[in-house]
Image (spheres, rainbow, N blue to C red):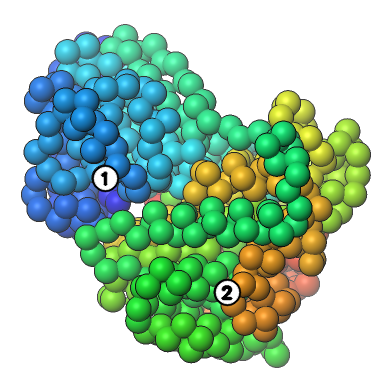
Amino acid sequence: MCGLSGEIRFDGGRPDLAAVERMTDRLAARGPDGRGLWSQGAVALGHRRLKIIDLSERGAQPMTDSESRLTGVFNGCIYNYRELRRELAGLGHRFFSGSDTEVLLKAYRQWGTACVDHLFGMFAFAVVEQDTGRVVLARDRLGIKPLYLAQRADRLRFASSLPALLAGGGVDTSLDPAALHQYLTLHGTVAAPRTVLAGVRKLAPATVRVVEPNGTQHDHRYWQPSYRRRPEHADMDAADWRDAVLDALRTAVRRRTVADVPLGVLLSGGLDSSLIVALLAEAGQCDQATFSVGFEAERGEQGDEFHYSDLVAREFATDHHQIMVPSDRLRTALDRAVAAMSEPMVSHDVVAFHLLAEQVSKHVNVVQSGQGADEIFAGYRWHPALAAVPREREPETFVEVFFDRSHAELGRMLQPELLADRDVSGELVRAEMAVEGAESALDAALRLDTHVLMIDDPVKRVDNMTMDWGLEARVPFLDHELVELAAACPPEFKLAHGGKGVLKDAAHKLLPSEVVDRPKGYFPVPAIRRMAPPVLDRIQQALSAPEARTRGIFRPGYLAELLAAPDDHRTRRGANTLWQVALLEMWLQSHGID
C-alpha cells in the first residue's frame, strides 16, 4: 500500500522532475516508510512506500526488472501474489525480492496488459516499457485504489490523490458544472472519469489505459460481471445460496490476511464487520485486534453503537479498543478530515473514519473493514422500492428514491454560470441502466450502485481516511469473486429479511441473533447531523470567507436561507443540506483552490 505519481511528456521534452518530486512528497502520509524517484526519456515516476509485504529494501519502488527492462510503481496489495509467483517461477521467471510489486512486473512481462486478469486484489499501477516508451496505467476491478489524471497536450500527470496533482502545479482548477451537478444530486458522488475540477480526471475502475509515446491513448475495460441468473445456479435454493455466499466470504477474508505486519478489524458492531471478526476467529486468528469509535450524543441522538461492538468483541475474545470522541474535538477533526479528502465527501462518517484511523494506526498497519456489503447484497432501505418496478421504469424510480434533489432545484441553489444546461445526473443513471447484462430492475440498480456510485463514496472514503495515517484498509466484501456471485444471486434472496437476506442467513451460523437481527445502523456523528456549535461555527466561517464570496458557487439568498435555519433544510434522503453545501467550500479552501 503506497502512493504513486508520474509524468509522461509528449512534446519531446524531459519530464518536470521537480513537479514529480512535489507530487511524491504530497503523498508522504500514504507511504511513510520510503521514497523513490525514477526517470528515463519522456517518463518520470515517484513513489512513497508503506511497508506491508517484504519489509526489506528489495521491495522499494520505483522497481525495475532489468531482464525485461520494465519499471513500475504500484499501490495496493495482490492477495494471490504467492500463488502467482509460483506459477511465474514455473514459467522460467527469476525473482530478486519477496514483494508483490515484483510479481506484478513479472506478470506484465508474461501476459502484457492481460496481467490484470490474473491479479486478485486492490491496485493502481503504472508500468513503463523502457524500450518502447509505452506506459500502462491500470486500476483494480472495484476501484478500491485511486488513480487521478491531469492531461494537457504536452504531457500527462498521474497520482494516487488529487491534492498530489495540485502540488505538481499547472492544473486547471475551475469547477466542472457537470461534476458539480452530480455532487449535489448523487449525495456527494462524482462518477469517474469526472472530478469537481475541470482539469482533473480519474481512471475508471477495471480499466487499463495504454499511453503511447506520441500521446495516443487507449482504454480497455477488463471486467464487468453479469447481473443475470446463470444456468449452473438453477437448482440452488435459499440454503444453497447461504452456503455459497458464506464460503465465498470466508475465502475473501482469508485472502486479506496476507501481510508481513499485524492486522486488525474496524468493528462497528454491525452485521458486516462482525462477520469479518467471526470468520477470522473461525480461521484461528486468536486475540484479534478490533477497533470501534463513537461520539457524544447530541439533542437525544445517540452517537455510538458500542453495545453491539462490545457484544461481538466479547463473543470472539478480541483485543478490543473503544474510542470515544468528545464533540469539542470535532472542529479540529473536521478540518483534518477535509484536508485528507481527494474529493469532497459529504457522508458524516468520513470524520469518524479519520479519527478512528488515527488511533488504529498506533496499533496495526492493516485492517479489514465491512464496506460494500449493502451495495452488493441490497441492504439499503430504498432497494425494495427499486425492485418493485418493471425494468423499463427503473431509471425513473432510482431518481425518485436516490437523488438528493432535482435538476430544477439546483437552479435555486447555483449561480447560473455553474448550473449544467441539462440533467447530467439523470442522463448518467439512464445510460448506465440501459446497458445490457442486468436481468431485473434491482439487478440494474445494484450494478449502478456497485460499479459506479459506491466507488466514489464509501470506497474512496475508506481509502482516503485510512491512508492519511499510513493505514491499509482491506474490504473483503469487494472481493471480485464474491461480487460476481452476489451479482448472480436472485433478487428475492437478497431482499429477504428486510435486505441482505442471504448474508443474514449466513451470519446466523456464526453470530449472535442480537447482532444479525438488529435494525440497520449507521456510523453516527450527531454533532454534524444536528449542527452542534463547533460544526456550525466552522461552517459559518467557511461560507463567509473572502474566497467563498469571490468564488460565488451558490446564490446568496439561498445560503442565507440555509444559515437562518441550519438544521431544517434536508435533502430527499434526509441529509443536512447546509453540510453538503459547506463541505464543498471547505474542501476547496483546504486545498488552496481559488
Q: Which mark is residue 490?
A: none
**Left or right relative to 266: residue 483:** right
| Residue 52 % position (x, y) | 24, 57
| Residue 99 % position (x, y) | 19, 45
Residue topped by disc 1: 82
| Residue 96 % position (x, y) | 9, 38
Q: Is residue 59 visible?
A: yes
Which residue lies at the image location 71% right of the left edge and 59% below the top edge?
A: 239
Between residues 195 and 548, which one lies in front from this camera angle? Answer: 195
Residue topped by disc 2: 510
**Left or right relative to 152: residue 259:** left
Which residue lies at the image location 35% right of the left edge and 28% below the top edge?
A: 115
Amino acid at the residue labelled 2: Leu
Which comes before the other along the chain, label 2 or label 1? 1
Which residue lies at the image location 35% right of the left edge and 18% below the top edge?
A: 211
| Label 2 residue SS | loop
Circle 2 Cα neighbour tier, 10 Å, few/some/many (<14 / 14–19 / ≥20): some
Residue furthest front in the image: 235
